[in-house]
Image (cartoon, rainbow, N blue to C red):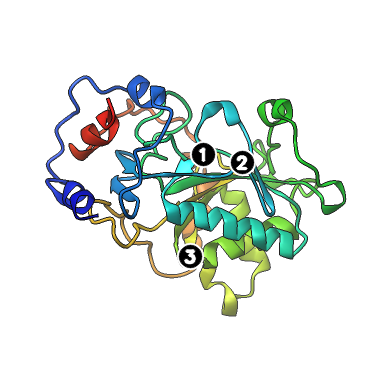
Amino acid sequence: MRNIVVFAIASVFASPALAGSTAQDWARVTAPTPKAGAAQSIGTYTSGCVAGATRLPVNGTGYQVMRLSRNRFFGHDDLIGFIEDLGRFAAGQQLGTVLVGDLGQPRGGPTLTGHRSHQSGLDVDIWFTLTTPANERLLSENERETLSAPSLVNLQTDALDYRQWSSAQASLLEYAARHADVDRIFVHASIKRELCQKTPAASNQWLRKIRPWWKHDDHFHVRLKCPDGSPGCQSQEALPAGSGCDAGLDWWFSAEAKLPSKAKPLPPPPLPIQCEQVLRQGD
């Protein structure tokens, strides 16, 4: 345990690019580093890794994991616990089965496709799709690869699709936002607006964690806080005060918000030097 703590603390802010390390290198790793005490989230959500990650069982109470071929169902123990809590809540409330998308790779790090974040073992995508309790069954491997999550939003008009949206999704988001380990949750702005309109102001402080962001119309992205015992984990900036149901939400429906970005994508930030050790451990 002492060794892994020292390894996580040392020089976390001195982060030269890893020599020769690429997203392909991280994708090729098929197993986490061995457990040596508590798991360690290292670096940031968009430039980091995880040591001693846990594999989420692909089936559990109230949830099933999708896209198994991607091998992105690993995370910090806190993330695994959160997903299992969410599944038990959904089962207990008879909301249906939660379909779980990507967590992270066995040792985190950058992915070849799909995400800039999900690197430090603290992010998970949850589909808005819920199986109905009357039709609950284990999905086949083929279904998990081929089924798609439908959008809940008409992206031309920003109107919520009430054929897809129900109180079940609202209950799931509220439970997730009230979870002690959750830092923030990204959803399409139309979903945030719906929650703001339907939640009394006297009890809407949980909406502070629900953050509007582009896309996120077919899934919500849960991001956990840096765990206790992971001194090398770097937190995101604190959320602004309030529920976020004020005039600032209107910007997301403006012409400016819908304009394609003209900025060139920034190169990925360098990974912490400790991630070199995580990647190479066992070579």
Q: Nearer the viewer, residue 181 or 5?
A: 5
**Residue 62: percent from the left, percent from the top?**
69, 53
- Tell me the mark number nearer the camera, choosing from 2 and 3: 2
The quadrant of the picture occupied by the C terminus is top left
Count all numbered tags in the image, as a single digit.
3
Residue 208 bears which disc, if any? 3
**Left or right, 36 with reference to 56:** left
**Residue 19: percent from the left, percent from the top?**
17, 23
- Which residue bears the numbered disc 1? 73
Q: Look at label 3 and name its amino acid.
A: Arg
The crowding category of the residue bearing disc 2, from other C-alpha atoms within 10 Å (few below 14, some 14 to 19, many at least 20), is: few
Q: Residue at x 26, y 32 (%)?
A: 281
- Quarter where residue 111 is shown: top left
Dot placed on the residue nearer the N-terminal end, 2 or 3: 2
Secondary structure at badge 2 equals loop
- Tell me the mark number nearer the camera, choosing from 3 and 1: 1
The crowding category of the residue bearing disc 1, from other C-alpha atoms within 10 Å (few below 14, some 14 to 19, many at least 20), is: many
Q: Look at label 1 and name its amino acid.
A: Phe
Q: Residue at x 45, y 70 (%)?
A: 242
- Quarter where residue 17 is shown: top left
Q: Look at label 2 and name its amino acid.
A: Val
Q: Residue at x 43, y 34 (%)?
A: 105
Relative to 279, is 99 above or below? Answer: below
Q: Using the numbered discs, state the Cα–Cα distance from disc 2 to disc 3 in whole angstroms.
A: 31 Å
The crowding category of the residue bearing disc 3, from other C-alpha atoms within 10 Å (few below 14, some 14 to 19, many at least 20), is: some
The quadrant of the picture occupied by the N terminus is bottom left
Q: Using the numbered discs, state the Cα–Cα distance from disc 3 to disc 1 in whole angstroms.
A: 27 Å
Residue 58 bears which disc, if any? 2
Q: Nearer the viewer, residue 198 or 31?
A: 31
**Is the Cβ of the residue at disc 2 closer than 8 Å to that at disc 1?**
yes
**Left or right, 254 with reference to 159:** left
Q: Using the numbered discs, state the Cα–Cα distance from disc 2 to disc 1 in whole angstroms.
A: 8 Å
